[in-house]
Image (cartoon, coloured by chain):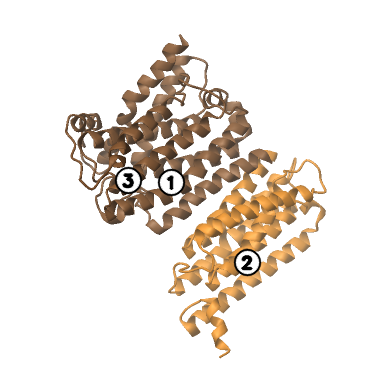
Chain colours: A orange, B brown
Amino acid sequence: MNNTVDMIMIFLVLTNLALLGLSRLGACIRVAAVQGIVLGMLPLALNRGDIPLHLGLYSAVLIGLKGIVFPWVLLRLLKELKTRREIEPFVGYGTSITLGMAAFVSCIWLGHRLPLPEAGMSALIVPAAFFTIVTGLFLTVSRKKALTQAIGYLVLENGISAFGAAVVETQPLLIELGILLDAFMAVFVMGIAIFHINREFDHIDADKLSSLRT
Amino acid sequence: MVILLKILNLAVTLTAAPLLLGIIIRVKAWFAGRTGQPLLQPYYDIWKLLRKGTVYSVSTSWVFRAGPLVSLAVTLTAALLLPMGGLPAVFAFDGDFLVFVYLLGLLRFFMIVSALDTGSSFEGMGSSREAAFSALCEPALLIGLAAVAKITGHASLTPMAASLQPALWTAAGPAFVLVGFALVIVFLSENCRIPVDDPTTHLELTMIHEAMVLDHGGLDLGMLQYAAALKMWLLGLVLVGVVVPIHSGFLCLDTAAALLCMGLLAVVTGIVESSMARIRLLRIPPLLIGAAALSVLALVLVYR
């Protein structure tokens, strides 16, 4: 049981590293989708014994939204755009991966300082969830394209929900679903915004928006 | 008896190394719909080169002549440290995996220095690429082996390989999978196989290893090619040793399994080469850093 959770967490870390090293937007979206699907299985893997209905429902909604709906919206958006890849990010890919490894090591240190309320949980949950949050933040600040920043936001949300999944049994389902709904709205709003930015300016480089002031 | 087994290990390594290359070339030919060259062609090539004389440019010094000799000597020394299946290594002492990794480092150093000695800008380019990429491969290999050493609790390659039982493998499964992936990338990159370097072309854009040996000829080239084949065999042995822990206790069975896996590795390499394009030069460092990252991750998981 614990081994499955460990595997999921390692997979989470690997997808994060892949996101840090990939330049193609389409590949980034797909990796984020796979991350979402794996994350959706986490509540089921964490649960011991038989699976209650609300947990199964939550998992299904999670997988459906993060694995199918979000990527579908973003991939559809990508079709409209001329951009296919991140050309020159603020931080290069090699540096990103190296920084990511450093971040993961410090997340492990942090995980030792933050023991989970329930004993017997996989020790990897806190580091991996924190690392996912840090990766999401890093992607939003270090990449130029608005689409990659949206993916960064999604990854950030994935990290928070991985963190939440560790304590999901003590948390009302309603709150989790509310957060998911917020993320759902956010992706749609970002999708529409990126579409309009692209139509107005012929590109989605977020750093060029500062030139609007002059 | 043990002495005999050690000698057998060395003998198999020395004789079978070029065969790996033969299998890869045959698989590639089969994928392309050709019959391909004979399986033993690399042996004929090396034999042909060893019988030829050498020509030295007047602008080169003793460094250029020392390059192939040192390369071959260093690879042969590295071959003494690796166990194969049930056969023990000729020498085994604590920390020999460090010696193994840095013997390969010495090999690269002499290849690079002897290529630079010619003063050709073309070889300088190849050396520069080789130096950049192998500097990234080295941590992946070293840290990966260090993770395996930590899991098994042995700092020497022979007991390390012997204690890699399937039970241990499943217990530390994630770490082994990560190290396995890192070692595959190191194997392909260090042996100039396709995602990193294309061994069959002589185009400036794609050459790394081939560019460095352009000015060597005859006996020297033969030695370099044999050293390269040995290096591929050795790195393959490391990979097979980590990924396929078959230790039934029967000597013949273990060794046969290891040799079979080496053959499979060659076939897989051939398939990878036939089905993948070479990636752009600028995209290679992230791939190799990724391999190093996998190794670091495995080590962190083990130490956690």
Q: In this picture, is B154 found above or below B26?
A: above
Q: Quadrant of the C terminus of chain B?
A: top right
Q: Position of residue B206 (x, y in %)?
A: 31, 53
> Dot 2 corresponds to which residue?
A153
Three-letter amino acid code at disc 2?
Answer: Tyr
Q: Nearer the viewer, mark 1 or mark 2?
A: 1
Q: Position of residue B198 (x, y in %)?
A: 31, 48
Front residue of B261/A192: it is: B261
At numbered mark 3, what does the secondary structure look like: helix, strand or loop?
helix
Count of numbered badges drawn on the protein: 3
Q: Chain of mark 3?
A: B
Q: Position of residue A80 (x, y in %)?
A: 46, 74
Q: Quadrant of the N terminus of chain B?
A: top left
Three-letter amino acid code at disc 3?
Answer: His
Asked if disc 1 and disc 3 are in contact, CB closer than 8 Å, the reply is: no
Q: Nearer the viewer, mark 2 or mark 3?
A: 3
Task: Tell me if residue A26 can be seen.
Answer: yes
At numbered mark 2, what does the secondary structure look like: helix, strand or loop?
helix
Q: Residue at x 37, y 35 (%)?
A: B232
> Dot 3 corresponds to which residue?
B209
Task: Tell me if residue B193 can be seen.
Answer: no
Indicate which disc residue B134 carries. Answer: 1
Q: Is residue B280 left or right of residue B102?
A: left
Q: CA distance from mark 2 to mark 3?
A: 43 Å
Q: Is residue B89 left or right of residue A3?
A: left
Indicate which disc residue B238 carries. Answer: none
User: Which image quadrant is residue B19 in?
Assistant: top left
Circle 2 Cα neighbour tier, 10 Å, few/some/many (<14 / 14–19 / ≥20):
many
